[in-house]
Amino acid sequence: MNNEQIAGVLRQMADLLEMKGEVRFKVVAFQKVARAVAYATDDVEQLASEGRLKEIPGVGKGIASKIDELLSTGRIEEHDRLVADLPDGVLLMLDVSGIGPKTAYRICDELGVSTLEGLQNAILAGRLEVLPGMGKKTAENILRRLYRPIAKDGRIPLGKALPIAERVCEAMRPLVPNVTEAGSLRRLEETVGDIDILGTSDDPAGAIEAFVRLPFVDEVLAHGPTKASVIVDDAYQVDLRIVEHESFGNLLQHFSGSKEHNVILRERARRMGLSVNEYGITDLATGKVERHTTEEEVYQRLGLPWIPPELRWGTDEIELAEQGRLPTLVALGDLKGDLHCHSEWSDGRDSLETVREHARAQGYEYLAITDHSSGRGVANGLTVDRLMEQVERVHDLDRKADDGFRLLAGSEVDIRADGSLDFPDEALERLDVVVASIHSAMTQDRERMTARIITAMENPHVHVIGHLTARHIGDRPPVELDIDAILAAAQRTGTAIEINASPERLDLKDTYVRRARQLGVRLVVSSDAHSVLHLPGLRFGVGVARRGMCEAGDILNTRPLLELLAALKGAAPSP
DNA sequence: GCCGTTTTCGGCCCGACTGTTTTCAGTCG
């Protein structure tokens, strides 16, 4: 069972306990651990087998035994008992935004409804609004959510959310000059639940008023004097929060989250006799409130160095900050080049000349052309002959331009189902950069897939494994593999693992990057651009690297050309 | 259920908004 699946069961436990009317703190304990498991760097099943579950923050004797039970039997007895005791369908109701555990229980219990369709019929028949504590408005709101589901865990991919956020900021900037993204978007999570935007103003209510009237706002979910939530493009929730100028640092810190990070920070503040909220920091002894215009001041007041948003997971970052052990994260400007890019020779859009020119304009020293191999029929993959022709062409362009920029000859070569490669070694050895990736037979079982990738890594000509798990976020699940075995093999063979920056992939994902880094596995950040328009997308990959705690030294393509080439050759030891 | 610069017991982060309420529970982040 993977971490995400375990976290899902624990979240359900929290919901069920809450519906059962269990004390708040017990519910919160399960919620906390669910998050910790979802963000755990280690494989929780592995931890359990070594009896180390209690190393996960928030896990004590009780929850540890629940996780052990889940992993050994596939179920948790208390979970089953709760489901049996509660009315049918309660968990289903929770998927509707606006329905929490209390309402879900009442709907199923008092209306005898157990499906979303049944709920819809009950509302249309006027049976919900007559319940005490409910009303016409509540019924209407729930009905609307049923017709246009904005699922609570229907996450928006980063690549889609960022342009929307930028459009909203653009529209608000005349009124709110310091308007900026916050929340999971600022932390560069791979998907975001909603789009958080904030700013300061002399007239918060006026700014909020203008926000809800923006032309692309389809629906207003909530509208108060300092905060509003709306739906744009018929599907995406955008929250705007405005406070007065002197609290900008407090507001930005508060709404950049994560929620768990803030909980730990506020608990820490309490021990210092301080209380933290989005307006300032209150000295509990004197009642005096300090406001801060920057985030640095907020953290400083709490005795901490500023913590980059990408590290605010609510795991161990505050401990690291206290100990002065925060890494100096890699930045986009540290990258000297890009090692994965396609041209019109395979399935890319642009010519070698165009790609070269744009990469140079991007400020890079080098760019690897890595078109597909022939195994990918659909992607117009190169035969060995065309590959050799392309290598000549690539070297020609550099000779002619004589501008110090270096186009590297490469390939994104297919890893076949048996782990062999699409090109013979004699062809691969003529290349500067060989990226080996999986594009087929993705349903292989864990053992075969793991062995297949390790076989590819053992080929001395393979420098990098591209988009390791082949997932498409929200679309195609990752392939099954033994990540620890893969990372160990990468370390042993010196093969680098790619952090693919394409927003629909972001593969390796952040938790795996953390593990890879701990193991000393070499990493590269690559755009996998199929058009020059994708080249700047490298920033998404840098975001993942930063979330993975990488410093510049952890990423091979922060090195200047000669050092990079030496390192890549080093990655190909003779068998 | 978890946890410890007062603690192995008694605490456990903070606030906005909505809808249905005469003071607050539920939901959300």
Image (cartoon, coloured by chain):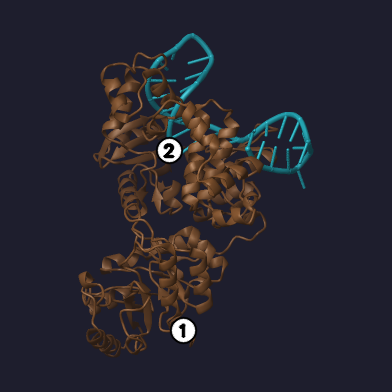
Chain colours: A brown, B cyan
Query: Is residue A178 visible in this depiction of the protein?
Result: no
Residue A23, position as x, y percentages in the image? 59, 28
Between disc 1 and disc 2, whose residue precedes?
2
Residue A238, position as x, y percentages in the image? 35, 41
Q: Which residue is labeled 2 in the image? A: A242
Q: Is residue A88 above or below residue A373?
A: above
Q: Is residue A180 above or below residue A227?
A: below
Q: In terms of depth relative to the viewer, which is nearer, B1 or A351?
A: B1
Mark 2 falls on what kind of element?
A: strand
Res A206 → quadrant: top left
Q: Is residue A197 above or below residue A452?
A: above
Residue A31, position as x, y percentages in the image? 53, 39
Residue drawn at 30 percent across, 45 percent down: A171
Q: Amino acid at mark 2?
A: Ile
Res B3 → quadrant: top right
Q: Amino acid at mark 1?
A: Ala
- Marks 1 and 2 sit apart, C-alpha to C-alpha, by 54 Å
Q: Which residue is labeled 1 in the image? A: A572
Density class for disc 2 (Cα within 10 Å; few <14, some 14-19, many ≥20) is many
Residue drawn at 27 percent across, 77 percent down: A373
- Label 2: chain? A
Q: Residue furthest front?
A: A73
**Tag 1 and tag 2 share a subunit:** yes
